[in-house]
Image (cartoon, rainbow, N blue to C red):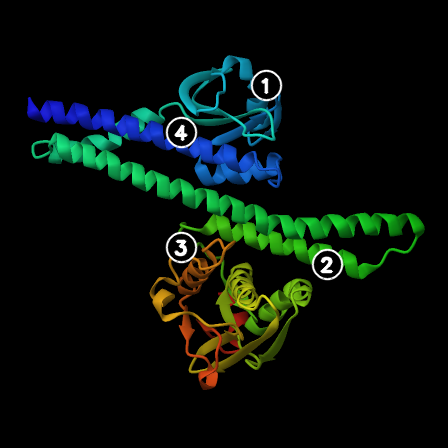
């Protein structure tokens, strides 16, 4: 009897905790999407949907979709009047859209925006969570007690609260990171359109648009890789040339932030087997971190060398350095000391370096100077080997 009662109680608590988690997740999403500064649109909702693993729809006061991550056929089937009504408190229920059933969460947008947020989870979400809970329940039910179950529920709620807060910080940071280059692209494009009408189009601003777009693509690709096994498509790459190209992408941003870069790339004919875009992502992350460490501007020293079969790149800034207390956690995902930081750059960069057979580490600054010094290394090949590798 005790085993059966404990199992039943555990399933009830799993259901309650999951529904509470969904309600918190939906409420946090509504706070973010309802913020006047959030760039509400289909593309931004698709990024939110990728992160939480569920489609998101924002409607106006009349129930018409104003932004959605839904595919076209699902968007046509969407009808707010067939779904649970939105209120100030998030609700979770099962609903039907066309031929499909979903577990739907809904809540009203907070002022000043008017409308509702719908989150469409898989229909079997609650059932699958119960099934996943069955195996551990059968192992521990004989020893479980009511007090332990209640403590487990309290712990689950603490974990859920921490996760949703981390999600909110991540989404706000992503919105901030994406908004700045998008604003620059928009302003330059409008200026160039005016010049086109006057017959005085200049190539430099168009090159800046391309650079900012590529930087955005690198940011999105990096975020999508967090927590996933690194998949590399390696081929012979000139690491110094790749580093120089990444530096050129960041030059407008660094110049605006009064950051100068002293580049001393001396690897010569070095060649590494690498995914060039992933190399760019690592170098971009290190340069942005260096710039973030110097909010009033400063100098970054970028140097490469080839020795002992390794290509090594060091990035050193003139900021305050990394406190001893946080060094052990520096490469953990979502750990950051910045107000608007995502906390994914260093973790992602180290993972990519290790996937290429190399590594990334924090080193003592040269001559004991203040600032942070990061060094990444990758296995190097002789200059004559790439052609043979391609023909193999």
**Image disc number at residue 63:** 1
Residue hosting label 2: 208
State how far apart marks 1 and 3 are (Cα): 38 Å
Q: Residues within 10 Å of mark 3 (few under 14, many from 20)?
A: some
State how far apart marks 1 and 4 are (Cα): 20 Å
Residue hosting label 4: 23
Q: Residues within 10 Å of mark 1 (few under 14, many from 20)?
A: some
Q: Earlier in the sequence, mark 2 or mark 3?
A: 2
Disc 1 to disc 4: CB gap under 8 Å: no
For residue 176, above or below residue 277: above
Which dot, 4 or 2, sits closer to the camera?
4
State how far apart marks 1 and 2 are (Cα): 40 Å
State the residue lying farthest toward the bottom: 367
State how far apart marks 3 and 4 are (Cα): 25 Å
State the residue lying farthest toward the top: 82
Tell which of 214 and 391 is nearer to you: 214
Q: Earlier in the sequence, mark 1 or mark 3?
A: 1
> SS for tag 2?
helix
Which dot, 1 or 3, sits closer to the camera?
1
> SS for tag 1?
loop
């Amino acid at each position: 009897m005790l085993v059966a009662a404990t199992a039943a109680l555990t399933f009830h608590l799993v259901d309650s905790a999951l529904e509470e988690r969904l309600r918190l997740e939906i409420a946090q999403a509504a706070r973010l999407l309802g913020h006047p500064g959030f760039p509400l649109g289909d593309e931004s909702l698709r990024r939110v949907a990728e992160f939480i693993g569920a489609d998101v729809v924002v409607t106006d006061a009349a129930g018409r979709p104003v932004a959605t991550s839904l595919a076209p056929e699902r968007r046509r089937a969407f009808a707010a009047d067939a779904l649970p009504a939105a209120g100030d408190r998030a609700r979770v229920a099962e609903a039907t859209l066309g031929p499909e059933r979903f577990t739907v969460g809904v809540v009203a947008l907070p002022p000043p925006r008017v409308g509702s947020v719908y989150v469409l989870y898989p229909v079997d979400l609650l059932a699958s969570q119960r099934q996943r809970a069955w195996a551990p329940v059968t192992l521990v039910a004989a020893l479980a007690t009511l007090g332990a179950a209640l403590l487990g529920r309290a712990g689950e709620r603490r974990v859920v609260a921490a996760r949703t807060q981390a999600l909110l910080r991540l989404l706000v940071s992503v919105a901030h990171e994406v908004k700045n280059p998008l604003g620059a692209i928009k302003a330059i494009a409008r200026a160039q359109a005016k010049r086109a009408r006057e017959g005085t189009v200049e190539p430099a601003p168009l090159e800046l648009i391309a650079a900012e777009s590529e930087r955005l693509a690198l940011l999105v690709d990096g975020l999508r890789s967090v927590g996933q096994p690194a998949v590399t498509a390696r081929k012979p790459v000139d690491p110094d040339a790749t580093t120089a190209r990444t530096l050129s992408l960041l030059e407008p941003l660094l110049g605006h932030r009064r950051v100068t870069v002293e580049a001393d790339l001396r690897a010569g004919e070095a060649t590494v087997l690498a995914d060039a875009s992933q190399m760019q992502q690592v170098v971009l992350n290190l340069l942005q971190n260096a710039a973030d460490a110097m909010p009033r501007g400063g100098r970054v020293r970028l140097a490469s060398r080839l020795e002992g079969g390794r290509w090594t790149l060091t990035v050193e800034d003139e900021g305050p350095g990394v406190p001893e207390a946080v060094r052990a956690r520096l490469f953990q995902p979502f750990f950051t000391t910045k107000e608007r930081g995502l906390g994914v750059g260093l973790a992602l960069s180290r993972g990519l370096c290790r996937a290429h057979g190399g590594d990334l580490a924090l080193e003592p600054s040269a001559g004991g100077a203040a600032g942070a010094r990061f060094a990444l290394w990758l296995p190097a090949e002789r200059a004559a080997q790439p052609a043979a590798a391609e023909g193999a």
